[in-house]
């Protein structure tokens, strides 16, 4: 990635690169790629030095690894939770699309070995934040697939946010030392919102992404009538895993008024 906010496109093979580890301009320390797969298409993923999370964004696919097989089906990323396979380095994963589907693959370097975990919607944490305060304008749904609390062996965090229509998420304005990437989707292609990275504002559109550098605040908002989905991915730092956010001191009174 060469900038904080971008609008990548799928190539002729159905591949959209979101983030590349080691990027000289804005290194998120993660490889993140989205694959648009046609019905019957098969893709195989293998990373000798990287752990890998394979997330079903939309559609129906089967996952195969180490002689195991699971399937996931998702007709709405707004209404339905994720299916995600998380494996350590050197584990080959094969994904077959049962219908036209979209799959996100997140990887990062990790020398640890751990047992593969297949997360279903009921295995993921599903929290609602900001309810019944400030006219529900900061109410959002946060689905956490894995983080330091349930996967301390991982160097990554993977989850999803549903930014309810006309409201805010990643709020109050906060930052953290670890790099973070957002991949946005709308169920209606004309949907739009705004991402604020420190003092810069960017128009969110379906399929766009944010590469949030360490230490920068990053609140989001979406337009009325357009609930917004985004996959949020964080890279832990050596000796400093992500466990919480640091609220901008100018806005701590907002968090205080919610308690």
Image (cartoon, rainbow, N blue to C red):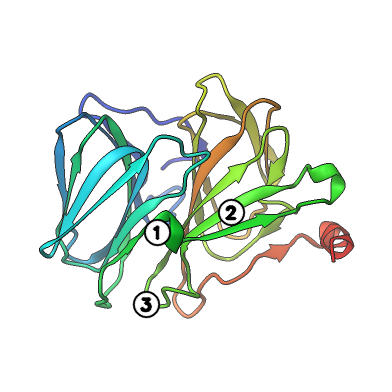
Q: Is residue 86 above or below residue 72?
A: below
SS under mark 3: loop
Q: Which residue does the numbered mark 2 point to in the structure image?
A: 142
Quarter that holds the N terminus: top left
Q: Are marks 1 and 2 in contact (CB under 8 Å)?
A: no
Q: Position of residue 51 (x, y in %)?
A: 28, 65
Q: Which residue does the numbered mark 1 point to in the structure image?
A: 29
Q: Position of residue 37 (x, y in %)?
A: 24, 33
Residue found farthest to the top: 190
SS under mark 1: loop
Quarter-of-image position of residue 153: bottom left
Identify the residue shown where x is 47% and y is 71%: 237
Residue 57 seen in the current view = yes
Quarter-of-image position of residue 112: bottom left
Q: Position of residue 106 (x, y in %)?
A: 34, 53
Q: Earlier in the sequence, mark 1 or mark 2?
A: 1
Q: Which residue does the numbered mark 3 point to in the structure image?
A: 153
| Left or right of residue 3: residue 36 | left
Identify the residue shown where x is 66% and y is 39%: 164
Camera-side residue: 73 or 65? 73
């Amino acid at each position: 990635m060469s900038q904080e906010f971008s609008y990548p496109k799928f190539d002729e093979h159905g591949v959209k690169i979101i983030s590349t580890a080691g990027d000289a301009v804005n290194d998120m320390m993660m490889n993140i790629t989205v694959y648009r797969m046609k019905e019957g298409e098969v893709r195989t993923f293998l990373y000798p030095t990287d752990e890998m999370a394979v997330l079903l964004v939309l559609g129906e696919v089967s996952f195969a690894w180490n002689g195991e097989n699971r399937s996931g089906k998702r007709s709405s990323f707004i209404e339905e939770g994720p299916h995600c396979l998380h494996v350590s380095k050197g584990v080959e994963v094969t994904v077959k699309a049962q219908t036209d589907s979209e799959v996100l693959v997140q990887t990062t370097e990790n020398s640890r070995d751990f047992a593969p975990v297949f997360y279903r919607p009921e295995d993921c944490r599903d929290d609602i934040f900001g309810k019944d305060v400030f006219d529900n304008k900061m109410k959002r749904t946060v689905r956490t697939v894995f983080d330091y609390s349930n996967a301390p062996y991982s160097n990554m965090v993977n989850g999803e946010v549903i930014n309810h229509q006309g409201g805010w998420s990643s709020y109050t304005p906060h930052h953290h030392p670890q790099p973070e990437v957002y991949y946005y989707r709308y169920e209606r292609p004309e949907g739009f919102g705004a991402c604020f990275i420190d003092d810069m504002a960017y128009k969110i559109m379906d399929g766009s992404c944010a590469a949030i550098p360490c230490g920068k605040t990053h609140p989001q908002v979406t337009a009325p009538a357009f609930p917004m989905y985004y996959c949020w991915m964080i890279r832990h730092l050596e000796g400093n895993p992500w466990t919480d956010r640091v609220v901008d001191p100018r806005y701590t009174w907002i968090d205080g008024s919610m308690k």
